[in-house]
């Protein structure tokens, strides 16, 4: 995943597009991970 400052966590992945639209960002500017565990790992590796 590229450097993003917003990450949607959970399913469905379409939530990513909804979040991006709500905060007026492009969908490619919002990261997505499937679970809280994956989000935790993403933050550790950031």
Image (cartoon, rainbow, N blue to C red):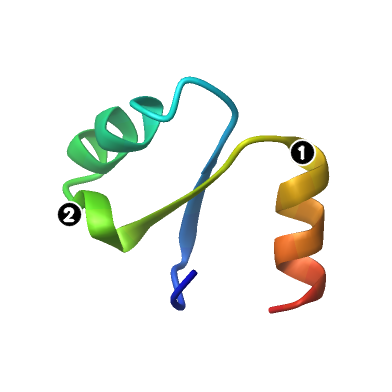
Residue at left offset 59%, top offset 28%: 10
Q: Which mark is residue 26?
A: 2
The Cα atoms of the two marked residues, 2 and 1, are separated by: 23 Å
22 to the left or right of 38: left
Residue at left offset 46%, top offset 20%: 12
Residue 37: give x, y in percent of width and height. 83, 44
Look at mark 1 in the image and give the residue it sits on: 36
Q: Residues within 10 Å of mark 2 (few under 14, many from 20)?
A: few
Q: Is residue 26 above or below residue 5?
A: above
Q: Earlier in the sequence, mark 2 or mark 1?
A: 2
Quarter-of-image position of residue 21: top left
44 to the left or right of 27: right
16 to the left or right of 28: right
Residue at left offset 74%, top offset 49%: 38
Q: Secondary structure at mark 1?
A: helix
Q: Secondary structure at mark 2?
A: loop
């Amino acid at each position: 995943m590229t450097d993003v400052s917003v990450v949607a966590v959970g399913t469905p992945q379409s939530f990513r597009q909804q979040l991006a639209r709500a905060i007026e960002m492009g969908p490619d500017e919002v990261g997505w991970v499937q679970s809280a565990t994956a989000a935790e790992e993403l933050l550790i590796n950031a």
